[in-house]
Image (tube, rainbow, N blue to C red):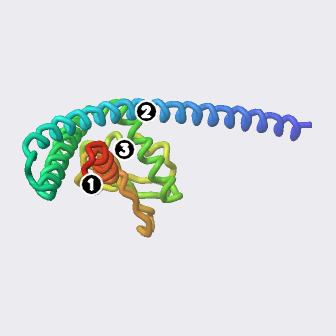
Amino acid sequence: MTNSSLEKTIDKILDQTEHDILSNLDGAVSDSHQILDNSVTKLEDEYDKIVADGRKEADKLEKQIIGGSDIEARNKQLLALEDAVSRVFTKALDQISNSDRNGDYANLIKSLLDESTKVLGTSEVIVFTNSKDRDVVQSALSNFAGSELSSETIDCIGGVKIQSKDGAMKFDNTIDAKIDRLKPLIRKEIASKFGVKE
């Protein structure tokens, strides 16, 4: 009789714990979707600005190169495009590096850690970050059992680099690396909108 009561009590506790965990996971997924939605809006705004800047540069170049050779015109277009893209990225990086490490940023760090551990397939990792992000990353690591924050800092705008504890696997999920991965795609899309072949 006592064993049956004990089993019912344990089952009830397990059910409640499972419900709490699933509820927390649903909340985290919802928060992540909201962060992504907010990021998309910001990226679309930056994209529109890049397109507008690119149009101005393209119009200016068109007037300058009328009567010039096709090769010279193409080279100037590429240089102007590269300059416009570089200026926008420089401005964006400056804004990111000077942004507050508030709740939205903490959610971004959690998202980067989650993505990184999924890529490596383990939460048994050593996490590296810059000195500005140490407190935010340390706080976020409480959600990643088996992970630890390295005493070494890295030079980056923000985000994390992680490696498995045996050092065999590494993943760079810094903001710098994400931007480097996106930059060629953005540059290519802008170039195609203006008919510039890279």
Label 3: how many residues lie within 10 Å, few (<14), some (14-19) or many (20+)?
many
Q: Residue at x 62, y 31 (%)?
A: 23
Closest to the camera, between mark 3 and mark 1, is 1
Instruction: Say which amino acid is labelled 2.
Output: Ile
Q: Amino acid at mark 3?
A: Val
Element type where label 1 sits in the image: loop
Q: Quadrant of the N terminus?
A: top right
Asked if the residue under mark 1 is in contact with the one under mark 3, i.e. CB atoms within 8 Å, the reply is no
Give the mark nearer the N terminus: 3 vs 2: 2
> In which quadrant of the rendered image does the C terminus lie?
bottom left
Q: Which residue is mark 3?
A: 137
Q: How many numbered discs?
A: 3
Q: Which residue is mark 1?
A: 197
Inter-mark Cα distance, 3 to 1: 42 Å
Q: Of the residues under marks 3 and 1, which one precedes in the sequence?
A: 3
Q: Tell me the mark number nearer the camera, choosing from 1 and 2.
A: 1
Please name the amino acid that badge 1 sits on.
Lys
The residue labelled by disc 2 is: 35
Where disc 2 sits, the SS reads helix
Q: Position of residue 104 (x, y in %)?
A: 37, 31
Query: Considering depth in this image, is 115 or 5 the residue closer to the camera?
Result: 115
- The answer to whether residue 27 is left or right of residue 174 is right
- Looking at the picture, tell me which residue is in the foreground, 6 or 113: 113
Estimate the spatial distance between the alpha carbons at disc 3 and disc 2, rounded to whole Å. 17 Å
- The mark nearer the N terminus, 1 or 2, is 2
Which label lies toward us, 3 or 2? 2
Can you give x and y, in whole percent of width and height, for residue 56 in the image?
16, 35
